Image (spheres, rainbow, N blue to C red):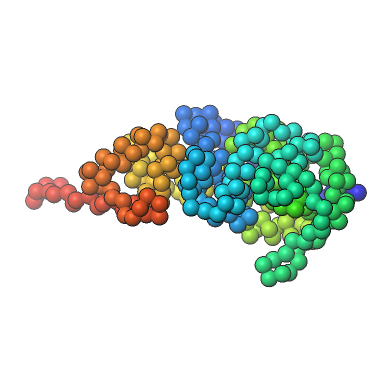
């Protein structure tokens, strides 16, 4: 029998209320003129975040290229992880978060080509350990997994807790049961998104996974401490902070946590230069995605910047970078101001 323990502190209640308010503000950005571009960018960030937590090294630019059908330099496994995550998140609204059968179907999508028994519960014992071999968590016996997952889904259906809290607890308990041979972390984060999306569809377009990636040490620490105590409270508090920070983070023309100061009223060439100044190795595709312009428009603007000697490419398209030329000093006549 699965025993779910947690306490609701005043801080947690305050965070739930603040998240509910922040959701409405975030909704305005997704419904604005920049909304389509922002949703696409957040999808890329979600995939990058949830796979990077598991050690995937592919960048946002490379993921953008993969989803666009272009070839990138990377291992087959990493590319398959990105494609699996894309397939799962792109189908998010088709899954019922209260269905164990749908969990297995989603796992099959997420781990296609990666796990021999994709879409099935594990039939072996597992432990979670550090790189040095220190055991952090021993998962329940494999033959108990179906019963424990049935208990977890029954709790999800019957609990009257707020969906924000239920999503965090389900995420924690799935990681604790560790029902699959591989893909448990990605599935825990994905299913939390599904539970949140069922409560408010806006969460399908909120890249909480990317914020978790930026704080992955704290993520694993919160998970480990809660597993050691058998109480999900610490993990719930951590995940609510990540959700709130994601909703509060600025999302126009920037990486998570990186402020570029880009002004939306700037013309396309100036915006291109500002993006390149912040990220010299950025690709044409990534620029187009972030600015919400077509690839041909960006190529034309870059060609004009090159012709005006304001921009040059150093090295090949893959592995090279951009350099911005300094503008000549302004000449002034003596005695003028």
Q: Quick check: 130 left or right of 293?
A: right
**Residue located at (50% from left, 31% from top):** 36
Residue 126, horizontal then vertical, whole percent: 78, 59
Q: Quadrant of residue 112?
A: top right
Q: Quick check: 37 left or right of 277?
A: right
Q: Quick check: 120 left or right of 18?
A: right
Figure label count: 0
Residue 125, horizontal then vertical, whole percent: 82, 58
Q: Quadrant of residue 298?
A: top left
305 in relation to 32, above or below = below
**Residue located at (51% from left, 32% from top):** 35
Q: Residue furthest left?
A: 334
Depth check: give the residue in front, 211 or 57: 57
**Residue located at (59% from left, 36% from top):** 205
**Residue located at (60% from left, 52% from top):** 77
Depth check: give the residue in front, 57 or 24: 57
Residue 2, horizontal then vertical, whole percent: 87, 49
Q: Quick check: 256 left or right of 3?
A: left
228 in relation to 155, above or below = below
Q: Is residue 168 visible?
A: no
Q: Is residue 336 visible?
A: yes
79 in relation to 157, above or below = below
Residue 158, horizontal then vertical, whole percent: 85, 36
């Amino acid at each position: 029998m699965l025993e779910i323990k947690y306490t609701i502190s005043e801080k947690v209640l305050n965070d739930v209320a603040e998240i509910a308010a922040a959701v409405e503000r975030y909704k305005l950005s997704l419904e604005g003129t920049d909304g389509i571009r922002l949703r696409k960018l957040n999808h890329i960030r979600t995939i990058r975040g949830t796979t990077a937590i598991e050690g995937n090294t592919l960048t946002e630019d490379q993921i953008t290229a993969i989803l666009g059908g272009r070839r990138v330099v990377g291992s087959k496994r990493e590319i398959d992880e990105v494609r699996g995550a894309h397939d799962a998140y792109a189908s998010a609204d088709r899954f019922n978060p209260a269905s164990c059968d749908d969990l297995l179907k989603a796992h099959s999508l997420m781990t296609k080509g990666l796990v021999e028994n994709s879409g099935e519960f594990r039939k072996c014992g597992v432990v979670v350990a550090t790189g040095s071999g220190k055991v952090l968590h021993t998962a329940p016996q494999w033959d108990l997994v179906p019963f424990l997952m049935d208990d977890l889904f029954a709790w999800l259906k019957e609990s009257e807790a707020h969906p924000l809290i239920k999503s965090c607890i389900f995420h924690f308990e799935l990681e604790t049961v560790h029902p699959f041979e591989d893909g448990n972390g990605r599935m825990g984060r994905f299913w939390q998104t599904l539970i949140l999306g069922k409560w408010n569809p806006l969460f399908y377009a909120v890249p909480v996974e990317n914020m978790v990636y930026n704080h992955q040490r704290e993520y694993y620490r919160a998970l480990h401490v809660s597993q050691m105590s058998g109480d999900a409270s610490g993990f719930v508090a951590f995940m609510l902070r990540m959700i709130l920070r994601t909703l509060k983070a600025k999302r126009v023309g920037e990486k998570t946590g990186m402020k570029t100061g880009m002004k939306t009223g700037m013309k396309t060439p100036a915006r291109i230069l500002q993006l390149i100044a912040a990220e010299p190795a950025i690709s044409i595709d990534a620029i187009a995605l972030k600015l919400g312009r077509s690839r041909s428009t960006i190529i034309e603007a870059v060609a004009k910047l090159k012709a005006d000697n304001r921009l040059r490419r150093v090295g090949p398209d893959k592995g090279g970078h951009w350099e911005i030329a300094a503008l000549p000093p302004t000449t002034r006549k003596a005695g003028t101001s």
